[in-house]
Amino acid sequence: MPYTYEFPRPALTVDIVAFALAREQIQVMLVRHDSESLGNPWALPGGWVRVDETLGEAARRELRAGTGLTDVFLEQLYTFGGLEPDGCERVVSVAYYALVNLAGRIVQTRPETGDTAWFPIQEPPEMVLYHDSILSMAYERLRGKVRYQPIGFELLPDKFSLRQLQHVYEVILDRKLDKRNFRKKVLSMEFVVALNEIEKDVAHRAAQFYRFDRRKYERLAKKGFQFEI
Amino acid sequence: MPYTYEFPRPALTVDIVAFALAREQIQVMLVRHDSESLGNPWALPGGWVRVDETLGEAARRELRAGTGLTDVFLEQLYTFGGLEPDGCERVVSVAYYALVNLAGRIVQTRPETGDTAWFPIQEPPEMVLYHDSILSMAYERLRGKVRYQPIGFELLPDKFSLRQLQHVYEVILDRKLDKRNFRKKVLSMEFVVALNEIEKDVAHRAAQFYRFDRRKYERLAKKGFQFEI
DNA sequence: CCAAAAGTGTTAAAACTACACCCATGA
DNA sequence: TCATGGGTGTAGTTTTAACACTTTTGG
C-alpha cells in the first residue's frame, strides 16, 4: 500500500456513454458489470483514471477497450460526485459521451469483461446504480446539442446522403422533418459539400453523396456563423 | 498519514467562477492566492473537496467563504484534469460557475485569505496557472447559455425593470438591443410578470417592476417551450 | 412495369428588424 | 423647464412551414 495522503481522497473514474445509429435507432453501448452484486446488470464502460493520463485520455482508453474504436467524437458530459451509501467507498465519476459511426465496422466485444452490447436508447436494460441517470443526461445533451452544433455528422460515415443525415435528425429529435425544407437548409451550408460519387446497388435512383468539411465549418464559425437545424 | 490506497489518487478540488453585474460590466470574483509563489497573483476561489460532501456542496461552501453569499445560481462548468508539470502533484479540478445578484448586498471579504475582489471580465489581473482558461470557458458558457436559458434573471434582484434586464443582455452579448423589440419579446413571455410596484426616487418616469416566475417558466418548458432572446 | 427513394419550387404565415415620438418625474 | 429614461406601433424584409409530382434505378 504505497500511496498515503494526509486527507482521504475519493477514487476517480471515467464513464463513457457511446452513442451510435443502428437499426433506425440511437443505440448505447453497455458492458456486463462483472461485480458479484445482484443479477449482474449492465453498466457504462469505464474505469479508473490513471495518474499519468488526462481525463480525456482515460476516456479514450476505456472506449477503445470496449469497442476497439479510436478517432471518435468524445466530449465531457458532467462529473458525478454524489455521496455513496454508507459503507461504500466514495467514487467521483467524470462522464463523457461519444458519437460513433458504426457503419460497416464490426463491434469488438471485450473478452476480459465477458460481454459488450448495443442497446436501443428507448429500452435500456437494468443498469448499475447511477448509470441510468448518466445515460439520461447524455441523451438530453445529445438532443439539445445536435440542433446547434454540427455533431450529427459524427454518427455517419464520411460519405453520406442527405437522406441519411435527415434520418439522424429525425431519430434524435424524434419527429419527422420535411424533406425539401431540410435539404434547402443543409445545402445552404457551404461546408456540406457534394462529392463526385453516388450510391451504388440501390433499387431506386441513386443518391448523391456529401461530406462534412470541418475546416470550412470552423472558418465560418469563427466569423460568427451559427449552425442550426 | 492515515489514508493509504493501493493506487495513486489525484487530489480533487472545486474552483468557482462567480459572475456579477456591477458598474455596467460583468465582474468576476477573485481571491489572492496565498501561496509563496511568484508575485502572489489572483486565483478563482476554490479548495479541496471533503470526503463527506458532494461536489456541489463543496462549491457552495467555497463560494460562501469567499462572498458570504448563499442561494445563488450555481452550475457545473467542466472538470479540468490536465497533467501537472513534473514534480507537482496531480490535481483534478471541478469548475463551477455562479451567477450572483450583488444589488444592495455587501460583499464580504474573507479574512483568512487576506483579500477578495471583483474584477471586470474584460480586464482580469494576472492569475495562477490554468485559471485564466477556466475563466474564459465560464464566460463563453455564460454568453452562449444566456440566449436560450433564462439565467439572465439570476444577475438581477427579484424585482427588476425591463431596462435592467435589457442591460444584462447588452452587457453579456456585448451589443445594443432594440428597446421596443426587446420589450415585445420579454413581455410575450408569461413567466415575466408585472408587479404592482414601480421604481422610486428616480429623476424620470418610474419604471414598472417585474419578476421572473420560475414555476410558470418550468411548466412551459416542460410543454416544449424554448426560451430565446 | 412496379416499387422505392431521389430530387425539385412556390406560397402563405410568422418572426424579425428598423425606426421616432410623447410621457412622467425629480432636480 | 430641463434632463432623463419610460413606454408605445408599424411597415418592410426575412425566415419558416406546408405541400405533390416527376425521375431514376433494380428487381
Image (cartoon, coloured by chain):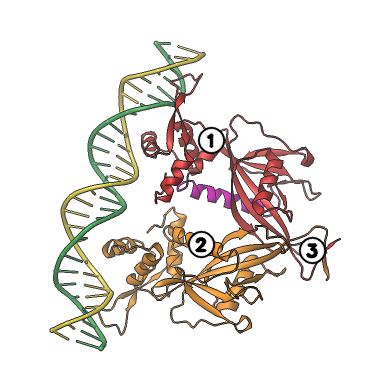
Chain colours: A red, B orange, C green, D yellow
Q: Residue most toward the front?
A: B38
Quarter of the figure with residue B186: bottom left
Question: In which chain is the residue bearing label 1?
Answer: A
Q: Residue at x 64, y 53 (%)?
A: A95
**Residue that label 2 marks:** B136
Q: Nearer the viewer, residue A60 or B83?
A: B83
Q: Nearer the viewer, residue B57 or B171?
A: B171
**Which amino acid type is shown beneath numbered disc 3?**
Gly
Tell me if residue A145 is in the magenta stretch.
yes
| Any part of residue A139 in sight | yes
Question: In which chain is the residue bearing label 2?
Answer: B
* Measured Cα–Cα span from mark 2 to mark 1: 32 Å
**Residue that label 3 marks:** A87
Percent from the top left, x then y, of residue A140? 54, 50
Q: Secondary structure at mark 1?
A: loop
Q: Secondary structure at mark 2?
A: helix
Q: Residue at x 47, y 82 (%)?
A: B105
**Residue that label 1 marks:** A156
Q: Which residues are magenta?
A: A128-149
Q: Residue at x 49, y 59 (%)?
A: B141
**Which amino acid type is shown beneath numbered disc 2?**
Ser
Instruction: Report the quarter where the N terminus of chain A lies.
Output: bottom right
Above or below, A134 relative to A111: below
**Which amino acid type is shown beneath numbered disc 1?**
Leu
Quarter of the figure with residue A101: top right
Percent from the top left, x then y, of residue A182? 39, 37
